[in-house]
Amino acid sequence: MFILLRQLATIRRDAHLSRGRPRSLALRHVDAGSCNGCEHELGAVSNPFHDIQRHGLDIVASPRHADILLVTGPVTTRMVGPLLTAYQAMPEPRVVAALGDCALGCNVLGDPTDVVGALEDVLSVDIRIPGCPPTPDAIAEHLLAALARS
Ligand code: SF4
């Protein structure tokens, strides 16, 4: 009888936790022409300290599995095609996030001839994560806010 009561309590607790837990989101990262500073900080959000996977956010290899296209760097002429291909491969609804001041069009790297422009010049941007580079805390905060809104 005691074991049955304990099992019932565990089932109720798990049901309560799953009701309160937000959904998960899959992120596909595309480097459209960054200096790799943003990638360095993005890598840190998956380390054991920040551990965004614990909250239901994961970086995936294929855009076909992604909810959010996470773009770093200004969009270069070489990367505009692959960027649009990744976007079109995503299932609807597609969410686009600009990670770092270059993607946001702050012209950090100057005005090289092989840069098309900011991410907003190519795709509609839903999430803006400013900074050069943004800290792992800032990246995690913006992505978790997106998860909470989903
Ligand atoms: S925002 Fe700063 S760190 Fe990120 S790609 Fe541009 S120059 Fe590099």
Image (cartoon, helix red, strand yellow):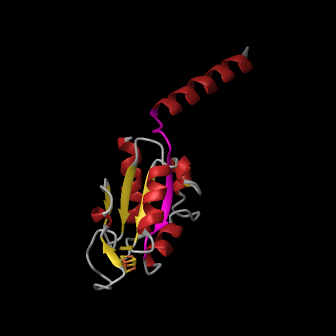
Of residues 149 and 105, which is closer to you in this image?
105
Q: Tell whether 27 sits left or right of 120.
A: right
Where does residue 62 sit, x and y in percent of width and height? 57, 54
Q: Residue at x 33, y 58 (%)?
A: 123
Query: Is residue 35 part of the magenta span, yes or no?
Result: no
Q: Residue at x 46, y 47 (%)?
A: 67
Residue at 50% from the left image edge and 57% from the top image edge: 28
- Judged left or right of residue 130, residue 60 is right
Res 3 quadrant in image: top right
Residue 42 spot, x, y in % from top left: 48, 68
Instruction: Please provide percent x and percent y for residue 21.
Output: 48, 37
- Split into 4 quadrants, where in the image is the C terminus? top left
Give percent across and percent down for residue 105: 27, 72
Quadrant (top left, top right, bottom left, bottom right) of the N terminus: top right
In reply to whether residue 31 is colored magenta, the answer given is: yes
Instruction: Please report the bounds of the magenta region as a residue range.
Output: 20-33
Q: Quadrant of residue 37?
A: bottom left
Q: Residue 104 or 63: which is nearer the viewer? A: 63
